[in-house]
Image (cartoon, helix red, strand yellow):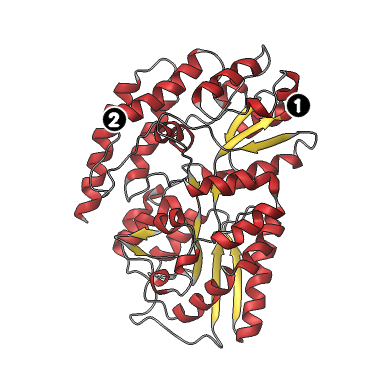
Amino acid sequence: MKLRRGARWGAVLVAGGLLASLAACSSGGSDSAGGDVAGQKLTVLIGSSGDAETKAVTDAATAWGTTNKATVKVVAANDLTQQLGQGFAGGNPPDLFYMGWDQFQTYASKQYLEPYADQAGNKDAFYPALTSAFSYKDKFYCEPKDFSTLGLIINTEKWDAAGLTDADIPTDWAGLEAVAKKLTTADTAGLSFGAEYARIGTFMNQAGGSMLSKDGKKVTADSAENLAGLTEVKTLLSDGVLKFPADLDSGWSGEALGKGKAAMVIEGPWISGLKADYPDLKYKAVELPAGPGGQSTFTFSNCWGIPAQSKTTAAAESLVKFLTTDEQQLKFSDAFGVIPSTESAAKVYSTTYPQNASFVKSNDYAVSPVAFAGASTVIGDFNAQLQGLSTADPKAILSALQTNLQAALDAANKK
């Protein structure tokens, strides 16, 4: 299922030596930004979750084009990371494109993006967490198109069979441990989620931990709070109530839930896509339980990126303004299930889709995973270490992460 990829750490810009090519090219477009709207021919590159998303974006772009006497071609990438990077490396980037949270800092730091959002009239309409995710050096670059958060997804049939009720929905780690134990059987793990920072990092945050200091200048990975988060995950593994997807013969935890091999998983609203493969699956989504540091979850998003100094900046900005209106974002929600990025539209979404209301509510305290330029390689190594967490020393894992992530941050700050 394609939607889940947006919430994983994902491929990085430097894949296949692309970074070297980008470093050698200009930021794309002409030397002077601007241009008219009428008569423009725009190319929009998206990373689509399927035919429904492609059609919805194409229909919206066509509607805008008709009104503004412009032409828009929407291209659904086979590999968004690769195709976007190739476009910039070749000096011919698309006029508008999906820019992922995990690539944004790399592109912004190299001045490939037009910081149009900082002057946009609707800049205050978006969730603060999303604005922060797409800001570089205190400047808001590109408007978020939608978002997803992580929640606890419960197989309600297994929940009921274990004698559990709504009163047992866990609100803290102790409650999570208790229900995971009751749900664990010889054939079913009580809990499952990916052995990766994009899932396990929520426990670190719930313990009060973070990857960076508030000013973003110092790595804080090797902390007592982060250690408490990793230790909690290791305890769940040691108790036998948590199994990683690979241990359940599954590619990701949603598959484990669909197969009945996991009773609870930590995933996002894309979990609704399971209905296609597992139509009999019954589940509910609730907020993640709080840790000793309070509630926390991750938020994931794409923004509408515009190349720096492009000839079609004015037209692209006009199209973004149309695409991010509440009305249009709610049409996208109807078409392919995404949560709107503006607070006002998200409230309407919560009422329309009450089964996903917890994902919207949790964005009030959600944070974005660390994603500064160069961090992805270090996080990849961290993920590899997390796969062996059940027998590893959490303190040693964090110590190595601290050293490597600080080196990456120092390198990023020198650029």
Q: Is residue 203 left or right of residue 246?
A: left
The secondary element bearing badge 1 is classed as helix
Q: Tag 1: residue type?
A: Glu
Residue 48 percent across, percent down from the top left = 61, 56
Q: Which mark is residue 223?
A: 2
Which corner quadrant holds the C terminus?
A: bottom left
Residue highlighted by disc 1? 157
Q: How many marks?
A: 2
Which residue is rendered at x = 25% and y = 51% of the image?
Answer: 412
Q: Tag 2: residue type?
A: Ser
**Which residue ends up furthest to the front in the rendered image?**
167
Q: Nearer the viewer, residue 235 or 317?
A: 235
Task: State whether residue 68 is above or below residue 233.
Answer: below
Q: Nearer the viewer, residue 414 or 199?
A: 199
Residue 199 percent across, percent down from the top left = 49, 35
Q: Is residue 307 left or right of residue 172?
A: left
Which residue is rendered at x = 41% and y = 66% of the image?
Answer: 90
Residue 201 percent across, percent down from the top left = 43, 35
Which corner quadrant holds the N terminus?
A: top right
The secondary element bearing badge 2 is classed as loop
Residue 206, image quadrant:
top left
Q: Label 2: few (<14), some or many (≥20) within 10 Å?
A: some
Residue 222, image quadrant:
top left
Q: Label 1: few (<14), some or many (≥20) within 10 Å?
A: few
Residue 377, image quadrant:
top left
Q: Is residue 180 left or right of residue 231?
A: right
